[in-house]
Every structure is written in structure tokens, then in C-alpha cells.
Image (cartoon, rainbow, N blue to C red):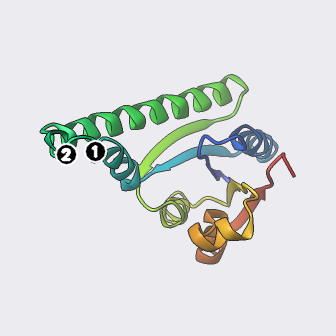
Amino acid sequence: MNNLLVAVDFSKITEAVIDHAANLAKALDAKLWVLHVTSDETQAVVYESTQFTGYSPEFVSMPGDIQLARDLSAEEIKREHNELLGISAKLREQGVDSQALLIKGAAAKTIVAKAEELDAGMIILGSHGHGLLHKALLGSVSEAVMNQTNRCVLVVPSPEK
């Protein structure tokens, strides 16, 4: 197993996921690819948050809303990229051969496609442990990954469980 792919989302569980992935990479003498998938939803949410529809009519269609949304989205992607680079640098300091990847796309589909491309022997990701309602409404990335790949998948449970 020369390559491992760990997918992170910068939530509370990320540190536990990275720790498990690092330990595996060291034990297997494997390269650890640290992937974060960002989506078009980031820009859409930011755009909606810049709309001033709750205010007086002159603010409803302010020029610059789209540019503001783009700027805020770019800032968020830059922040995510810097955080990802920091994780990878910290792993290298610990002796793990690590490479950061930031890709735009649908989370599960992108994770599976990148694992195929890298010929990763295992995909490592976290489970947030959300309830059934959350799962029914939004789905589960970890479950979708397991259903879309024939590769080994390690799901690290939420430390809150």
C-alpha cells in the first residue's frame, strides 16, 4: 500500500482523522495524500448571505453583490488551502510523506475519483455521528464513499461518541 488518501473537512473530527491516517501511513510506510473537497455551494451560500432583501428596496439589487460573493468565496477557499497546507506541513515534520490537495467538486464523487487516480490502498475519513434526520436530509459523505468504491475505507468515529 504505497498511497493513502485522507479526506478532511476542517470540522472537530479532523484532528482525530489526521492522527489515525498519520499512524497508518507511518506503519505502512505509505505516502499520505490529504484531500479537502470544496464545492460550488460555498459560493452559493456566500452569495445568498450578501443579498440585502430584508432591507429597503434600494438595497435589494445592489451592484457588487456578485463580486462580493466571489471575493468572500475566494477568501474562504484561500483559508481552507492554508489550513490544508498547515496540516500537510505538520505531518511532514512528524516524518510522514504528505501532500495536500484542494479540489473543487462533489465530496464523495471527488474523493472516490482521486483515490482511483492515486491508486490509494485506503480512503480514510471521519464520521460526524449526526442523527437520522441529518442523514436523511443531507446524506452521509462517508456512506456515499463506501457505496461508490471498492477500495478499503476507514471511517474514524466522532470522538464525542
Residue annotated with mark 2: 60
Mark 1 surroundings: few (<14), some (14-19) or many (≥20) residues within 10 A = some
Q: Earlier in the sequence, mark 2 or mark 1?
A: 1
Q: In this view, does 86 lie above or below 63?
A: above
- Residue that sits furthest to the top in the current view: 93
Q: Is residue 53 above or below residue 84?
A: below
Where, quadrant-wise, is the N terminus in this rendering? Answer: bottom right
Q: Can residue 151 be seen in this view?
A: no
Q: Which residue is drawn at 36% across and 54% down?
A: 40
Q: In this view, does 68 lie to the left or right of 75?
A: left
Q: Is residue 42 left or right of residue 138?
A: left
Residue 3 spot, x, y in % from top left:
63, 52
Q: In this view, does 124 lie above or below 101?
A: below
Q: Which residue is drawn at 57% across and 61% down?
A: 119
Residue 24 spot, x, y in % from top left:
78, 46
Asked if disc 2 and disc 1 are in contact, CB closer than 8 Å, the reply is yes
- Residue that sits furthest to the right in the current view: 161
Per the rendering, the mark at residue 51 is 1
Q: Which residue is drawn at 59% across and 32% down?
A: 88
